[in-house]
Amino acid sequence: MSETMRAMVYRKYGGPERLALETVARPAPAPGQVLVRVVASSVNPVDWKMASGAIRLYMPAKFPCVPGFDLAGEVVELGPGVTAFAPGARVHARIAKPGAAAEYAVADVDQTATMPDGMSFELGAALPLAGMTALQGLRDRGGLPMTGATQRVLIVGASGGVGHLAVQIAAAAGAEVTGVCSSRNVNFVSRIGANTVIDYTRPDPYRNTGPFELVYDCVAGDPAPYLGLVKPGGRYASCMPGPKTFLRMLANPVSRRKVYPVMLKGSAADLAFLDQLFDAKKLEPAIDGRATLEELSTAWKRSMTGRATGKIIIEVAPS
């Protein structure tokens, strides 16, 4: 196996124009890690936000930086002491440090799961970060039980990467789901499991709606526009938390409507749970588009518009 690989790299903060295809050293797996030949990756907003420097206070880039947190591929080498996987295993993961936009990447065993037989590499790459963010936002921050749920749930940004998976997870749990999206995505959000769809482009879109036990905001980090839709004792959670989310969270001890940021924790167990939903045909990532590794900057620009329906896949290698 070659000691080098192709990877997309940026060497200082900036926009997609900073990305360049380079030949770099292939990583080696440490204890508790596996080396994966990456077949597919996917784009998440955190990739280009990190590259821009906008979130450097809590997610600084280490230059030169290979971006990307989602991958699907084949295990080619085990780190010392690893017995959970064998070479050739089809796996996917949300890796702890960026590096998925490359031909090879290392993944921690506790963040890696074996892909179901019926799952393609592109669907495997689409699921980890967005799927676990959706799951943890609904279950851990939103208090939604994963079976027998009876809550009314409002999902803002229901056609996006996290939102469209949150709709399906909440519906599979039994919740009554209302999705919020633009006019062009109303049919899509209804088709993936929302009981009701709100077109936010219409005048006064939230009139005569609610209250909800949970509002999951996958678009913005300001709870103010939505707290009036949360019933007393209910929760607002945001996977795009801004300063207003954290400030409002300080009032949780005395407020009847709780506010929580969603901060993803990589988990092989959570990824396996999502895989079970996929196997049961209750969850499937939607693919907005595909790009080659060399076209990553174009894929980022598409993600930056905020108009992607589902996930953007990066085809790194032939499957």
Image (cartoon, rainbow, N blue to C red):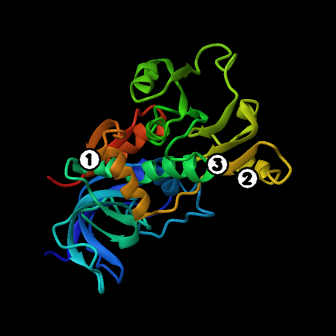
Are the residues at dot 3 and dot 1 in contact (C-beta closer than 8 Å)?
Answer: no
Q: Amino acid at mark 2?
A: Phe
Question: Which of the labelled discs sits on residue 284, or is there none?
Answer: none
Q: Nearer the viewer, residue 90 or 233?
A: 233
Name the residue carrying label 1.
122
Q: Earlier in the sequence, mark 3 or mark 2?
A: 3
Task: For the N terminus, give its image quadrant.
Answer: bottom left
Name the residue carrying label 2.
246
Q: Residue at x 41, y 19 (%)?
A: 187
* Residue 235 on image: x %, y %: 69, 43
Q: Residue at x 25, y 53 (%)?
A: 116
Q: Nearer the viewer, residue 136 or 186?
A: 136
- Identity of the residue furthest to the bottom in this view: 80
Q: Residue at x 39, y 50 (%)?
A: 274
Q: Amino acid at mark 3?
A: Pro
Are the residues at dot 3 and dot 2 in contact (C-beta closer than 8 Å)?
Answer: yes
Which SS class for mark 1?
Answer: helix
Name which quarter of the figure residue 31 lies in. bottom left
Q: Earlier in the sequence, mark 3 or mark 1?
A: 1
Separation of marks 2 and 1 at Cα, in angstroms: 35 Å
Name the residue carrying label 3.
241
